[in-house]
């Protein structure tokens, strides 16, 4: 019985060490998409982190996020590596963890304005 308990405890420790916590970031998503050029001309999401003034282009979108123009979002997003990405594809993908807020408004300081 003692060996069984020790083995179970060892297994729990071993499995626990395999679990990785993935860090998340908070992003603000602009109320409008912007023209951008990746492989071809397209529309991109504009995002920034709280406290920043400059918007950045996100070419591949955010998995699990349904964007509606006219709303500014605050999201919790996780970055994951893409295994075997296509030759012209990104090596990372963005995954929605949580929508923290959604507010109908026009975002300030958008590029090209």
Image (cartoon, rainbow, N blue to C red):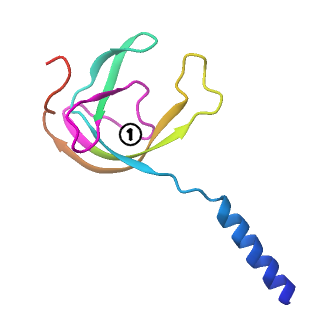
Camera-nearest residue between 95 and 55:
55
Q: Is residue 21 left or right of residue 110?
A: right
13 or 95: nearer the viewer? 13
Image coordinates of residue 34 in percent, x first then y, are 27, 20
Stretch of the chain drawn in magenta: 48-73
- Quick check: is 71 in the magenta stretch? yes
Q: Is residue 50 above or below residue 35?
A: below
Residue positioned 30% across, 34% down in the render: 47
Q: Is residue 12 above or below residue 108?
A: below
Q: Quadrant of residue 77?
A: top left
| Secondary structure predominantly adopted by residues drawn in magenta | loop
Q: Is residue 77 magenta?
A: no
Residue visible at 42% across and 15% down in the picture: 38
Q: Position of residue 60 (x, y in %)?
A: 44, 27
Q: Quadrant of the N terminus?
A: bottom right
Single out the residue that lies furthest toward the bottom: 1
User: What residue is rendered at 70% in x and 65% in y?
Assistant: 15
Q: In which quadrant is the C terminus drawn?
A: top left
Q: Secondary structure at mark 1?
A: loop
* Residue holding disc 1: 65
Could you tell me which residue is drawn at 52 percent across and 33 percent down? 92
Q: Residue furthest top?
A: 40
x and y percent of residue 19 in the render? 62, 59
Choose top left, top right, bottom left or bottom right for residue 78: top left
Position in image of residue 33 (x %, y %): 27, 25
Q: Residues within 10 Å of mark 1 (few under 14, many from 20)?
A: some
């Amino acid at each position: 019985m003692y060996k069984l308990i020790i083995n179970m405890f060892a297994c729990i420790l071993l499995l626990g060490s395999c679990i990785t916590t993935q860090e998340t970031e908070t992003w603000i998503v602009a109320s409008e998409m912007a023209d951008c050029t990746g492989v071809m001309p397209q529309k991109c999401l504009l995002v920034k982190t709280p406290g920043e003034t400059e918007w950045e282009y996100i070419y591949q979108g955010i998995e699990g996020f349904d964007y509606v123009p006219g709303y500014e979002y605050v999201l919790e997003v996780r970055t994951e590596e893409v295994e075997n990405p296509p030759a012209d594809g990104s090596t990372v993908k963005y995954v929605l963890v949580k929508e923290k807020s959604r507010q109908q408004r026009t975002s300030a300081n958008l590029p090209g304005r």
